[in-house]
Image: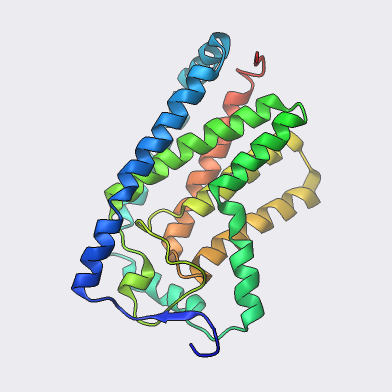
Amino acid sequence: MKDGGPELVPVPSPAARRSFWDARRRRPAFLVFLLAGLVAFLIWLPSVTRASLWSAVRAQRGLLFLLFLFALVTLSLIWKAGQRLDSRVFTLINTQVYPKWLDRFMWLATQPGHMLVAFFAAIVYFLLGRRGLAAEIVLGTLTLWLLVEVIKMLSSRARPYLTLDGTRVVGVREMGNSFPSGHTSQIFFLVTLFVHHIQPGTAGIAALYAVAVLVGITRIYVGAHYPRDVIAGVVLGSVWGLLAAMVDRYWLLLVF
């Protein structure tokens, strides 16, 4: 698009796709980084907290089974069935002509789903004395992104701008695979956790989930994800938030 508008990205050549695949080799390194962070965090926790956390996980084996079943179902979504509808809905949202101010707003609106925002929230709550909530945010974020990255590596679903002609990319071209949406998973995890801890009332809950839904829509708008990627992120993040809320009553006796 002219005049500095969003970039219209053509379908890349096979050579360009090979080059992009080379860039995606960094994803396993990121996965190792997440795993190392999780291990370091668990080591940092007091032994009584680790014991309580383990008891909570064992007590929620049914939910963990449902989560595993969900992973199998979501992996099935990457197959050919539904791809045509996915592409149509994506094209309907992404390829329209929008004003520049809306592009800027949607780019800003997608940022709450970033992992760094979750860590910033954890630091704020830690400084405010809400150490249990801060720890749950860190632990939940690390484990959630580990799961997201594993599913991404298994799915090998390319980003829309690599497969659909005329895709608009607002902001940077995000690397890695498309399924599921990590930003959407992250924001729904945080919102579910905040609703459990803060209990903001009906209006507050509606506002929080409105922000989460907006983040999900922005992932399609900016050209980063297909609709099914976002739907999977909604379910995955919500399940992870519910799991964290159920675990919460087992490890409120945090000792730092």
**Is residue 60 in sight in this rendering?**
no
State the residue at coordinates (57%, 25%). 247
Disc tally is: 0
Q: Is residue 201 left or right of residue 76?
A: right
- In the depicted view, which residue is nearer to us: 50 or 25? 25
- In the depicted view, which residue is nearer to us: 82 or 4? 4
Against 166, is 125 above or below?
A: above
Residue 121, given in percent of the width and then of the height, sits at 67, 41
Q: Looking at the image, which residue sits at the far bottom?
A: 2
State the residue at coordinates (68%, 58%). 210
- The image quarter containing residue 80 is bottom left
Residue 151, given in percent of the width and then of the height, sits at 34, 46
Against 241, is 165 above or below?
A: below
State the residue at coordinates (61%, 28%). 135
Residue 161, given in percent of the width and then of the height, sits at 37, 72
Residue 252, given in percent of the width and then of the height, sits at 66, 19
Against 182, is 65 above or below?
A: above
- The image quarter containing residue 123 is top right
**Is residue 39 in sight in this rendering?**
yes
